[in-house]
Image (cartoon, rainbow, N blue to C red):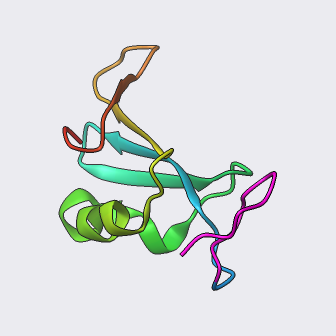
Amino acid sequence: MEVETKKQTKTKDGSKMIKTVIKMKNDMVMVFDVRGEQMPAYQGPYGNVKDRILEDAPPGAVFIHWCGSDAVPETMGREEW
């Protein structure tokens, strides 16, 4: 359950909230909180972290595919990710 504040940065249990999730072309995943800090507990091979991320990410989290050498990554919904 999330705590309602002006600037939500943590869940009720005090853990950081997921803000941005990036899947790279090599199937590795990087995850950042609202302050731009990495969240190592959610990072790693896609198959290993996907379910945990989808379970814990709030509705406003941004899911990105950054494949190839495109300068601009592709933003997508959590269902497609």
Query: From what the image shows, is residue 78 above or below residue 71?
Result: below
Give the residues drawn in magenta, as a range.
1-12
Give the residue furthest to the bottom.
Answer: 13
Closest to the observer, 76 or 38 = 76
Query: From what the image shows, is residue 45 above or below residue 52?
Result: above
Q: Residue at x 53, y 76 (%)?
A: 1
Closest to the observer, 4 or 70 = 4
Q: Residue at x 32, y 71 (%)?
A: 52
- Residue 72 picture location, percent across and down: 45, 15
- Residue 51 picture location, percent across and down: 24, 67
Q: Is residue 53 magenta?
A: no
- Residue 35 picture location, percent across and down: 74, 51
Q: Residue at x 52, y 69 (%)?
A: 40
For residue 34, side relative to residue 27 (left or right): right
Q: Is residue 11 magenta?
A: yes
Closest to the observer, 15 or 60 = 60
Instruction: Say which quarter of the image contains residue 12.
Output: bottom right
Instruction: Say which quarter of the image contains residue 44.
Output: bottom left
Q: What type of secondary structure mainly makes up the magenta span? A: loop
For residue 79, side relative to residue 17 (left or right): left
Q: Which residue is drawn at 31% across and 60% down?
A: 54
Give the residue furthest to the right.
Answer: 6
Instruction: Say which quarter of the image contains residue 47.
Output: bottom left
For residue 32, side relative to residue 23 (left or right): right
In the picture, which quadrant includes the C terminus? top left
